Image: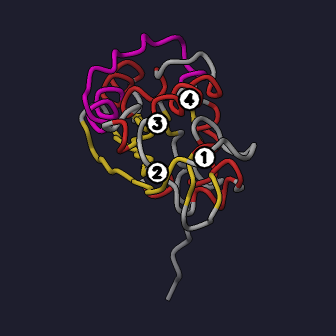
Amino acid sequence: MEIPPIIPAPPMPPLLFATTNMDKVREVALLLGPGWPLRTLRDLPPIPEPEETGVTFMENAILKARAYATASGAMAVAEDSGLVIDALGGAPGVQSARYPGATYPEKFEHLYRALRAHPRPWTARYVCAVAVAAPDVLYTTEGVCEGEIALEPRGTHGFGYDPIFYCPEYGRTFGEVADAEKLAVAHRGRA
């Protein structure tokens, strides 16, 4: 009996991760591992950014995934994520990237001013909604990580709101843990 030859699987096509945020790209590349090449919006000719008109993270993720899949002709993965603080009625929420302040330390100052009127603990969560489209939505998922807002920013790891997000599992802020440790429990890793 002759054994048929093993035909290697074709290489994975590059996946378009529809972002220009290289911190997010670094995290997603770490999650996917070396077997799946990533392309980002920086690798393509300019594509107009869709207006994020959704009122939920998932609505915005779907909107972006469909827009970038249609414009690029590629399967696109888009995410929308942010910080939700209970004492602030869910703010900054879907406006996390556009919350007042030109830098994250300025955003932190604004949040701490708003939180002073509320008793602690300041419960919060990170939310990440992911949509895959080509251009119709093929898949959606959401990851959530519960925590609190720390009394002050701590740590230099991560990005965005990580220095103020206290993770009970680690007893530290996400700014105080390495990427792999963060992704094991964080919203993006869970999504």
Whole-angstrom CA distance, mark 1 to mark 4, is: 36 Å
Residue contact at pointers 2 and 3, CB within 8 angstroms = no
The residue stretch that appears in magenta: 41-64
Give the residue displayed 60% in from the left and 15% down from the top.
Answer: 102
**Does label 1 or label 4 sit earlier along the sequence?**
4
The kind of residue tagged 1 is Leu
Residue under pointer 1: 151
The relative height of residue 2 versus residue 186 in the rendered view (above or below) is below
Instruction: Classify 10 Å Cα crowding around label 3: few (below 14), some (14-19), many (20 and above).
Output: some
Sequence order check: which comes first, mark 3 or mark 1? 3
Q: Determine which residue is flagged by label 4.
A: 40
Foreground residue among 161 and 53: 161
Q: Is residue 64 left or right of residue 110?
A: left
Of circles 1 and 4, the one toward us is: 1
Q: Which residue is mark 3?
A: 115
Looking at the image, is mark 2 or mark 1 earlier in the sequence?
2
Q: Position of residue 167 (x, y in %)?
A: 56, 58
Q: Is residue 108 visible?
A: yes
The reply to whether the magenta stretch includes residue 120 is no
Figure coloring = secondary structure
Instruction: Report x, y in % for residue 44.
Output: 55, 19
Label 1 Cα crowd, 10 Å radius (few <14 / some 14-19 / many 20+): few
The span from disc 2 to disc 3 (Cα, nearest Å) is 9 Å
**Residue at point 60%, 43% (across, down):** 164
Q: Residue furthest right?
A: 156
Q: Residue furthest bottom?
A: 1
C-alpha separation, residue under disc 3 versus residue under disc 1: 10 Å
Q: Secondary structure at mark 2?
A: loop
| Pointer 4 local density, CA inside 10 Å: few below 14, some 14–19, many at least 20 | some
Q: Which mark is residue 120?
A: 2
Task: State which tag comes first along the sequence, 2 or 3.
Answer: 3
